[in-house]
Image: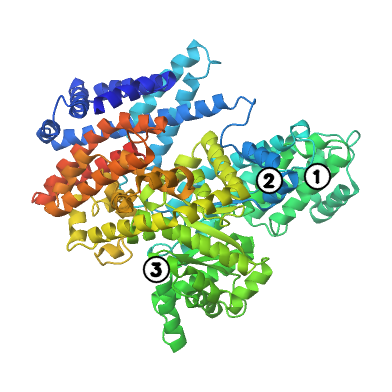
Amino acid sequence: MRSAARATASQEMPGPLRNDVRLLGELLGDVLREYRGPGLFDDVERLRRGVIAARNGTATADEVAAFVASVSLERAEELARAFTVYFHLANLAEEHHRIRTLRERDSGAVPVPGSLDGAALAIRDAYGPEHLERLLAGLEFRPVLTAHPTEARRRAVVTGIQRISAALSRLDDPRYGATTRAETHRRLVEEIDLLWRTAQLRRTKLDPLDEVRTAMAVFDETLFRVLPAVYRGLDTALSPGDAGARPPLAPAFVRLGSWIGGDRDGNPYVTAQVTREAIGIQADHVLRALEAAATRIGRTLTVNAENTPPSPELTRALDAARAAQPALLDGVAKRSPNEPHRQLLLYAAERVRATRTRDADLAYDGPDALLTDLRTVQASLAAAGAPRQAYGELQHLVWQVETFGFHLAELEIRQHSAVHARALEELRAGAEPSDTTREVLDTLRVVAWIQDRFGTGACRRYVVSFTRSAEDVAAVHELAAYAVPESPPVLDVVPLFETGDDLERSASVLDAMVELPAVRERLAATGRRLEVMLGYSDSAKDVGPVTATLLLYDAQARMAAWAERHDVRLTLFHGRGGALGRGGGPANRAVLAQAPGSVAGRFKVTEQGEVIFARYGRAAIARRHVEQVASAVLRASTPEVGELAEQGARRFRELADRVSDAARSAYRTLITADGFAEWFSRVSPLEEISGLRIGSRPARRSAARELADLRAIPWVFAWSQTRVNLPGWYGLGSGLAAAGDLEELRAAYDSWPLFTSLLDNAEMSLAKTDRAIAARYLELGGRPELRDRVLEEYDRTRELVLAVTGHQRLLQDRRVLSRAVELRDPYVDALSHLQLRALHALRDGVQDEAERERLESLLLLSVNGVAAGLQNTG
């Protein structure tokens, strides 16, 4: 069965992708032979053939394990490195092919499926132009970058992969001749050799500012240029005949946020000083980018005053500039004689530079002042009969300023409610503040400094983890008054509801929250806007994936109804992880499965760890992702989609509750079993994962070793390494079995988007689970009853998910993903066997220090490789 599926997957692989994978694999083989002679390559091939044979049934997993046990630890590490590098190259080839496919689909004849322009035009046809105009006016997509430690690759590895990708693209470009292709091939081998020789593991732990600088790469390399392209594409679709020659119809609807350097919940390394430096790094990057863009556009804007005369407003702006900076303006005018539009734009570029270098005499006081200058140039050009100059490249710069401001991304603060409670207790008692309390106050002072330096919009959201009552919101405002009594910072305190109990009482907390004077004041100032965050990770870890999904849906529905009653413009902030066990999965499908009225044109979501580079690391993929999400937000905000969700909820709610109750019971019975936490630590590399040094944040909120104290990310990461993927599906089988009515379950799957999304995500998680390999991990715990319980629930869930979906095999209707999983599985098996060797030895105890270090290194290399092979961590 597995052999047939793998053969089918191989046959279905598109020719260009097959060629890329073969080429990169052959070049890696050449590199391995050069590095260690034929011996290493032969061992890699023996292990590769062995795991494929084990899946085909012509060999056994025990034979594979015996071979892995027979090689030296040094050779085992080399094998782990080889398979890890192979996965990096295979992932690159798939990404390369995805970009190729997107380019081929974009024929221009019809909108690409899932595109933003396609959704906008469909809504205009169905509901009229005025309805679309209202939707676009309120459209918001707010991705928030977080430093949650799920990106297992070193930055050096990521940049090496990017260089290989660039070389592969050149080989794919028919414009290049034989000489260039030969040189590109040579360069490709050199880069693969370098990737092989680059250490896969970090030797030092990241600090928060390292994480800030790492995240800046997606801004520098993609987002700054991609987002104006997204806006332009929508603008062109709305009125193609005069696009670029009229004021834009498309708004700048994306606003970046960041927790990197601001999220201090359980992370003692994020201090007030780190937050201050983080916003400085962000500002430096965006101001350099804006300066370069303004300079580039200014140098090319060589329109002459005789054929394109300046407006009186532009003339006055230049006069004011000359009065303020005569020497600078004389220099600009000398380089741009009789080109007033160019002069003002180049002067604006100099002012952006001065803003970055903090030259107070020349600097802008904020992005609005820069926008005023840019719009003055635009209006003057348009009035002079040069609308294409006004609304072409110059409009891209306007969109960039509107999107990024002078701070790039709003830096959000997060802290645990218990930290605030202890701080207030000390301050109210007049006691000497502890170090923790001083840090809370210093953080709020830095928020005030950021607002004074970069504007209120640069840092005003303060997320309170584990919000249990309105008092947790009031505490932040009171602490701000202690920190800066003369002029507290402007704060929008965002309650974060994470556990099942917190989600169920969320609406009642909001009732009390809007009665707080500070909140009432902010509602009045913001047009009655309010933000609430929903925690997917901890809720799923608390009650299981099925019940968490329904609790989150119910919470959204209750809060949407609450917002309507209170005339509040509510934005729900979705704290979704990359992995399915933490609310991950396709973002556009998730948007369409939200409760009716809960989207309302606005979607805010965390983008975490490996997801940041997967979604935003390449321009074509970043554009596709932004368009898919924005398209889904528009569609989810239409009456048709809302009615579909309402009908499904009404018809199938009782059925869903039966599924949820049984699923929750099964899940809670497992994780509350006596000794479960210790067993989990033995069967997985949970305790060793911190050795990857993939983030600054500790795996646990405190020194306690209980499951409740374990963060959701290492919980999901460790389960993915065992090939069980338990957080993505456990309990669903019991729930479906308890529901009983197969036909009604099928009807729910076919017609209720929430239930469809729930089962599709579980199916994806099951497809990445391997029962045979998982059983070997579960054996390590010495608890056969827990092992059997997990495997029986897997069998039950797989059988019933297939029955409800009507599929003969997992991911039957998603052949691209299914093909990728089927082709990868044997190679992931190889890394799992290597990891199991290390885990067995470490769990049995190793006395020799040098041997233990080699085993730990092997374990971490295999963890890195499995993460690359499965393409998710946490």
Precedes in sequence: disc 2 or disc 1: 1
Pointer 1 residue: 377
Amino acid type at mark 3 = Asp
Q: Quadrant of residue 597?
A: bottom right
Is there CB contact under 8 Å for labels 3 and 1?
Answer: no
Q: SS at mark 1?
A: helix
Q: Residues within 10 Å of mark 2 (few under 14, many from 20)?
A: many
Distance between mark 2 and mark 3 Cα atoms: 42 Å
Residue 638 seen in render: no
Is there CB contact under 8 Å for labels 2 and 1?
Answer: no
Q: Residues within 10 Å of mark 3 (few under 14, many from 20)?
A: some
Quadrant including the N terminus:
top left
Give residue 514's position: percent from left, percent from top: 58, 74
Which residue lies most toward the bottom here? Answer: 429
Q: How many labels, in total? A: 3
**Tag on residue 501?**
3
